Image (cartoon, rainbow, N blue to C red):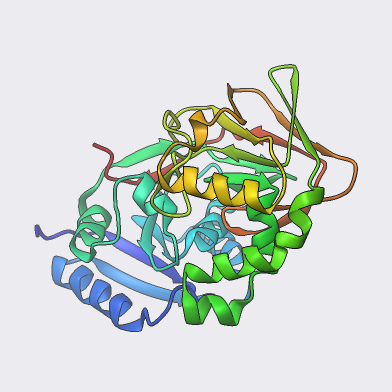
Amino acid sequence: MAATNRKLLIIRNPVSGRGNQKRFDKVLALLKKSGASVSVRTTEYAGHGTQLVKQVLDSGEDWSAIVGAGGDGTIAELANAMVDTEIPLGIIPMGTANILAREIGIGTKLKKIVAVLVSAKPELIYPGLLEQKRFLLMVSAGYDSLAVAELRLEEKRKFGAFAYVIAAFRASKQFGSLDLSVKANGEIYKGASIIVSRSRLFGGFFVVAPKADLRKLEFHVLVLKNKGLWAAIRYGFSLLSGRLSTCRSVDYIQTNGPVELLSQEGVPCQMDGDDGPLTPQIIRLDERPIKILAAYK
């Protein structure tokens, strides 16, 4: 790997993923071997990543990139502070799903991660906005957001991605009463579960919106119309096989305008895999891009 003089500030979430200390140490060793100058700061609570980035930007510190080491939620925290800055965002994926890393071509192999951090040119990507909070991947309300609301941290640490399956079955008693609507492009669509995506991928490896591209100002909206546990299971199998967006009982909408999530009773949203506010909500595109170190083909 070619030598580099990049100065990298790594903001690490120490609770992301399972058993990732050795993995993180290997990344640091490879970065130092490449010639990069590295400094590490650690988050201590939810939202701390946003505060740390704001402090760095306000101080005028000189960094080649601010790098998030954690899961998708950690990266979203950093992105919320990276407004109107020329400093790019880098990623060391340490979470359960690592959707963003896969979305931008980095994946989870250590040598590729390091190569991107020390040599990649920044790409521009556009976040979404919910209650003036940025998200990079998706917002949803319904089956998966109820599961996220039921997720227990100790199970996530112990079982990894399977913890979401456990949480989904815990939330399944609510699946039969889901009644949501979404307004997009001036039309209203009704369903049991709504996904408003900026990304192609969902849950790590599974394609939910084949034409989505973080570099484009566009939402891809999926309306899962059928309700109940068995409907959720069938949608799950369709997701696993990459056919969710083409199911007969799924409406698939593309829009560059605002998206309204509507409901009579409040349903929790999830944003990039973390808990979000209750519906109803309006989701908008953020035209202020983020520079990100990526490996798009």
Residue sitting farthest toward the top: 186
Q: Quadrant of residue 22?
A: bottom left
Q: How many marks?
A: 0
The quarter of the rendered structure image containing the N terminus is bottom left
Residue sitting farthest toward the right: 264
Q: Position of residue 38 (x, y in %)?
A: 31, 71
Residue sitting farthest toward the left: 2
Q: Quadrant of residue 90?
A: bottom left
Q: Is residue 110 above or below residue 22?
A: above
On the rendered structure, is 94 left or right of 172?
left
Q: Residue at x 43, y 48 (%)?
A: 240
Q: Position of residue 44 (x, y in %)?
A: 58, 79
Q: Quadrant of residue 285?
A: top right
Q: Position of residue 95 (x, y in %)?
A: 44, 67
Q: Position of residue 252 (x, y in %)?
A: 57, 27
Which is nearer the eye, 223 or 4? Answer: 223
Q: Is residue 225 among the parts visible in the rendering?
A: yes
Q: Residue at x 59, y 23 (%)?
A: 256
Q: Is residue 44 among the parts visible in the rendering?
A: no
On the rendered structure, is 222 left or right of 125?
right
On the rendered structure, is 74 left or right of 240?
right
Q: Is residue 27 above or below residue 284?
A: below
The quarter of the rendered structure image containing the C terminus is top left
Residue sitting farthest toward the front: 230
Which is nearer the eye, 227 or 61? Answer: 227
Q: Residue at x 71, y 55 (%)?
A: 276
On the rendered structure, is 3 left or right of 109?
left
